[in-house]
Each structure stands twice: as C-alpha cells, then as structure tokens.
Image (spheres, grey):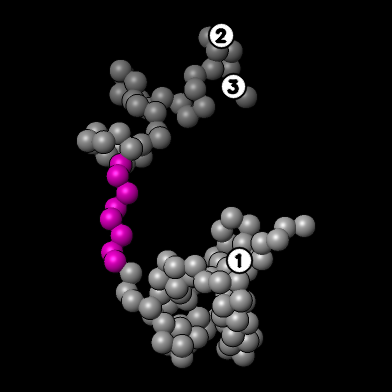
C-alpha cells in the first residue's frame, strides 16, 4: 500500500498539501453532487477562474486556476521547417498513368483479388 494519497490538487500550478487537497476535493464533490456538471459554478463561488479534474501519475488531480491561463504556444511541428502535408496525406500517390494506386497495395502478379 502506498503512503501517497490518491487525491491531489494544485492552484495555479502550486501543489496543495494532502489535507488542503482533500478539503478542496470534498467541497468540489459536494458541489458537483448538488449541481451535476457545474464546474464553472464551483469555480465562480470560490473565486477561481476555472477548476478541472484530471488524472495524473496515478492520482486524481484537481487543477485550479485563479487567473486566466496564458495563451498556449502552438506545438512545434515535427520536422521543423518542412511544409505541411498535403490534404489527404495518407492516400497513395497517383501512378504514372494518372490513376490512383490501389489502397491495399497492388496484388501479386498473376493473382487476382476476390
């Protein structure tokens, strides 16, 4: 058995103590039982901008923000400066005769697909 609690919470990225986290989860759960799905209402009533339950490293984590989150930077594209893939990127390229290649690959010579 682990000494670590299954409940955790953070406010603006700062982790709360186990006791504070459990208290926050208790209040959050009580509110959600009375107002199903109303996370925004819980946040508003407690002076928070947002409250989001999630699961991280084997713990239920309640993420609380008291300020607007800074806009996230778009993730860098893999491959750096390569151009974006063309639409329908997983389609096979057309053959030299202009017809598209079959999706499942060409059948072996002399054999027909059924």
- Foreground residue, 9 or 78? 9
Q: What crowding class fits label 2: few (fewer than 14 Cα within 10 Å), some (14-19), or many (20 or more)?
A: few
- Looking at the rendered structure, the secondary structure element under dot 2 is loop
What residue is disc 1 on?
A: 60
Q: Is residue 97 left or right of residue 48?
A: left
Q: CA distance from mark 1 to mark 3?
A: 52 Å
| First in sequence: mark 2 vs mark 1 | 1
Q: Quadrant of the C terminus?
A: top right
Q: Quadrant of residue 56?
A: bottom right
Q: Residue at x 35, y 27 (%)?
A: 93
What residue is disc 3 on?
A: 113
Majority SS type along the magenta span? loop
What residue is disc 2 on?
A: 110
Q: Quadrant of residue 70?
A: bottom left
Q: Residue at x 54, y 17 (%)?
A: 107
In the rendered image, residue 96 lying in the magenta stretch gets the answer: no
Question: Residue 25 — which label?
Answer: none
Q: Which residue range is magenta in the image?
A: 70-77
Q: CA distance from mark 2 to mark 3?
A: 10 Å
Q: Is residue 37 left or right of residue 84?
A: right
- Foreground residue, 3 or 74? 3
Q: Position of residue 60 (x, y in %)?
A: 60, 66
Q: What crowding class fits label 3: few (fewer than 14 Cα within 10 Å), some (14-19), or many (20 or more)?
A: few
Q: Quadrant of the N terminus?
A: bottom right
């Amino acid at each position: 058995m682990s000494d670590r609690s299954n409940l955790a919470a953070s406010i603006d990225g700062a982790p709360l103590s186990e006791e504070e986290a459990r208290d926050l989860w208790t209040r959050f759960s009580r509110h959600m039982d009375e107002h199903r799905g109303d996370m925004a209402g819980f946040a508003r009533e407690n002076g928070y901008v947002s409250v989001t339950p999630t699961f991280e490293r084997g713990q239920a984590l309640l993420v609380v923000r008291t300020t607007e989150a800074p806009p996230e930077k778009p993730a860098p594209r893999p491959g750096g400066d390569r151009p974006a893939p063309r639409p329908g990127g997983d389609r096979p390229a057309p053959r030299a005769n202009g017809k598209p290649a079959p999706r499942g690959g060409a059948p072996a010579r002399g054999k027909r697909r059924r």
